[in-house]
Image: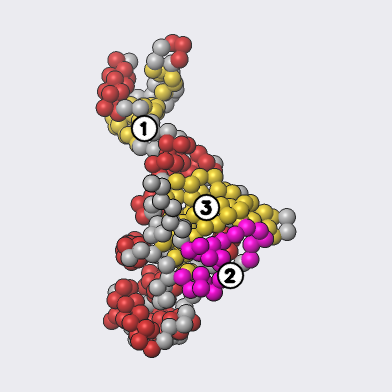
Amino acid sequence: MNYPRPTPALAIHDLRKSYGDLHALRGVTFCLERGERLAFLGPNGAGKTTLIRCLAGLTRADHGEIHLGGKPLKSVEARKHLGFVPQEIALYRDLTTRQNMVAFGRFYGLRRSELRNRLDWALQWTGLGERADDLVGTFSGGMQRRVNLACGVMHAPQILLLDEPTVGVDPQSRQRIFTMLDELSESGTSILLTTHHLDEAEERSDRIVILDQGQVVADGSIEALVKQSVGTQRWVRLRIDRPLTAPLRVGAAADAALIGTTGEDRISTRIDDVSTHLLGLIELVRRRGYGIVDVQVEAPSLHHVFLHLTGYELRD
């Protein structure tokens, strides 16, 4: 028996947005499933910020549809289920942690016991209970981001949009923020985040969407994207004890692959099965009279996928 597929938490179809002659979004379509953690990547200028602003209701798209839980974005009921935490710290620096959380809770319509319960939860969740009555303007950047994150989820949204949630924070604060997000994910919150950290996307998401020049150029799990774009062969790099005196090739003469060039002390190639082919490669190099100083084996990663699809480093 075929069962109907659950309605996605967030569905975007053919979203388009232009600023004069600049086409920021060119027909963006994708879904965020319920309880899913989705990382949104793209070089600067790809359209990520415009997309997030459209989803958060801060910018009106020229064309296309956005549904939250099956309801149009303009629906008041649908908007109640969405939380948004911008890249910029959006806090009242001259108010305390508690006062900020209460202010945002009231903004989202929380009152009395519901507000008290969410305030207690937020202070415990952020680990800032002992700093509840301190001015947030005195906090470190990492602590401010934790308060910022808590303020964005005071109304317990089903969907959370995060724009660069760990930008400018130290490694300890970064880890703490993702521990907090893991707790939200485990409770069923659907999370969409943009990030410039490929390791964050690779380690902290269920699926990756890559945007380039206003269009989705990849959508899938890391494993699927690697297989579809760069393949599953592993990179092997050997450093030898002296520069090559002649080009080094492996394979039959008709289809020999160049793995090292004259004057270089490094050899690089790709192989399908490390356990089968690496020893043969090492033996070939040794038979040519070269000693091996170092061996590196690198599996294809999200970094390779990103460069293959966009041609840019993520920071460009």
* Range shown magenta: 60-81
123 above or below 27?
below
Q: Residue furthest right?
A: 20
* Callout 2: SS: loop
Amino acid identity at mark 3 = Phe
Q: Which residue is mark 1?
A: 234
Q: Residues within 10 Å of mark 3 (few under 14, many from 20)?
A: some
Amino acid identity at mark 1 = Arg
Q: Earlier in the sequence, mark 1 or mark 2?
A: 2
* Callout 3: SS: strand
Q: Residue at x 32, y 34 (%)?
A: 296
Q: Earlier in the sequence, mark 3 or mark 1?
A: 3
Q: Residue at x 31, y 17 (%)?
A: 284
Observer-nearest of 185 and 133: 185
Q: Earlier in the sequence, mark 2 or mark 3?
A: 3
Q: Which residue is mark 2?
A: 74
The answer to which quarter of the image holds residue 270 is top left
The answer to which quarter of the image holds residue 187 is bottom left
**Mark 3–mark 1 distance (CA, rounded to whole Å):** 30 Å
**In the image, residue 129 lies at what x, y percent?**
29, 80
282 above or below 20?
above
Give residue 30's mark.
3
Q: Is residue 212 magenta?
A: no
